[in-house]
Amino acid sequence: MPAAAEADLLLVLPLALPLLACALGAVLWRFPMAQRGLTLAAAFALLVAAIALLAHVAARGGPVASQMGGWPAPFGITLVADLLSAALVAAAALVYAAVAVYGCADGPTEREEQLYHPLLSGLMLGVCGAFLAGDVFNLYVWFEVMLIASFGLLAVGGGRAQLDAGVKYLALNMVATTVLLFAVALLYGMTGTLNMADLARRVPEVENRGAVAAVALLFLGAFGMKAAAFPLFYWLPASYHTATPQVGAVFAALLTKVGVYGVFRLFTLVFAGTAEWMPWVLGAVAVATMITGTLGAVAHWDVRRILAFNVIGSVGVMLVGAAVATPLAIAGAVFYVLQDVLVKANLFLVAGAIRRAGGSYALARLGGLWRREPLLGLLFLLPALSLAGLPPLAGFWGKVLLVRSGLEAEAYVIAVAVLVAGLVALYSMLRIWTEAFWKEAPEEAPLAPHRMGAAERWLMLGPAAVLALLTLSLGLWAEPLLAFALAAGEQLTAGREAYLNAVLGGAAAP
Amino acid sequence: MTGSLILRTSARLLLVTCVLLSVFILVRGHNEPGGGFIGGLIGALGVIVYALAHGRARTLRMLRADPKSMLGVGLLLALASGALPPLLGISPLLTHQWGDLVLGPVALPLGTTLLFDIGVYLTVAGFALAVVLPFAEE
């Protein structure tokens, strides 16, 4: 197969597979078991395709681009994968697969006849599309796809609480996508192009630097709201705690990451060095997000609410990479983002298992789980400690890189904030540990303790165990991922020209 | 059965009008403003008015296909319009194909974009109905 056709296929498959699963799932809506098989098949096929794409990008040593329909860039639709986006697609596929297996623990549910599976595939389509989009307008479109699918997943088949959360989620996120659309339109008005590689060449030539900075801030606002960054995070704790464990895992692992990815993509490629004060804004947002997110987690006594606030705290840690913006800082953020995808999916799946085994999400009603379900306790502890950044888990290495880059750049406040936020997150996680697992079960237990059957146990805990083992092995054997993250950071900073050449230089080929 | 006699009678007329108009807009979208998206919305509108007058169960019987299946078939058609040319080895992905459908003396110019637009029509109409119909009262 010629190299160009191979790249085309590898870049299209992560979009075609979820789209096909979405279409077939909708046709098969009457048959929950067939839809389950379809979701499983699509998830593992996507995982294989994403790993093939990652291997291709790593072997090429530079970004890979494909022009859809043979229209040359910057006029057509371009799909681009560099190390960061390929790795994120692979991580997303892993979460998709974990959730597909976990979903088999229950018997067929009514939700599954209400488009649950097509919506899940649609969400994966939007996530993969956003990671691979080569122009800002398509990035916006993929955000819309994600928004429709995620609203559906929250609200469909749920009760009053889910619909209430879904409407809040939809209304606040619509504001963010509208701001994003305005920002895209303004950028097009200033430069006459939407292709990100073309923008990277033209934006520095725009004379009105104030306007460029204003548009950059609009993008930061829109992506920041999607990423649940301070001060626009309030939609997340209002909605995430009502989702089912599978939906919560996908949301927490992937949705905020797409916003973070948008910040990294645009602020390294298009808006690099727009204004001297921009790193200060990003730094302030990162620190405030870390602190408010983790403090919010401490204020709650419900497993899912604690986890939801920790999603916000982690977003702050990732944004440190964009604020400091040295290759080392971006490498640290890449490392942290990738392990956080595993950790967040793991924690929300374990929360579902806690609910199943203990009968509640409220810490006051839980207890004694360590004695009854030691494996569950271990599977909670590994991602929880990685979230806090304790060695020898994967989160530790991401934070080491970020703190070191902060110290090297003399951004001491940021470095200290990462450490403090880690401590507060640790406290909030240990509270779940002591309350749900360690203390004696309360007298007035909500349900009789549920004994999980063997098949149920393995379908629920198996995916969590795979994710937890990955987190542990990425911590113990961090060298390959560290080298990968450093290479990805290099691509995003010094390697910008390679991205531009991959998109624009290859335009004459077809 | 809800609604007045006037509503029930006019709903049937509106349904026919909306569906015909939506198909016209779908085909017109080929060269002029219109297309599958707006057409699908107009078609769904007619069905929703019908559901207001006659209730959900009767509307689903009238439609014969569940909106969720419409949505799925529409997505498959749209996917096929982009994926068939490369699968048949004609051209790269998402490239248009044009040709004439000869029916005796008339040659009808057709392209894969029409297939895409019909797919969009079914997807949009199916999604709108799948969201709205559960709220329609019996």
Image: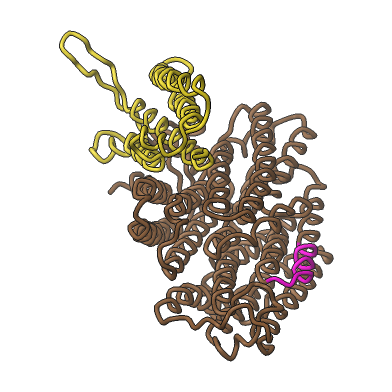
Chain colours: A brown, B yellow
Question: Residue A199 vs residue B9: left or right?
Answer: right
Q: Which residue is drawn at 50% across and 27% down?
A: B49
On screen, residue A432 above or below A228 = below
Q: Position of residue A117 (x, y in %)?
A: 43, 54
Residue A450 x %, y %: 52, 81
Q: Position of residue A57 (x, y in %)?
A: 45, 55
Relative to A262, residue A61 above or below: below
- For residue B25: magenta? no
Is A293 magenta? The answer is yes
Name the foreground residue: A184 vs A82.
Answer: A184
Which residue is at a point 38% across and 45% down the rendered structure image?
Answer: A23
Between residues B26 and B126, which one lies in front from this camera angle? B126
Name the residue nearer the viewer: A174 or A471.
A174
Q: What stretch is highlighted in magenta?
A: A290-302
Whether residue A77 is visible, yes or no, is yes
In the figure, residue A364 lies in which quadrant? bottom right
Name the residue located 69 percent from the left edge and 40 percent from the top edge: A175
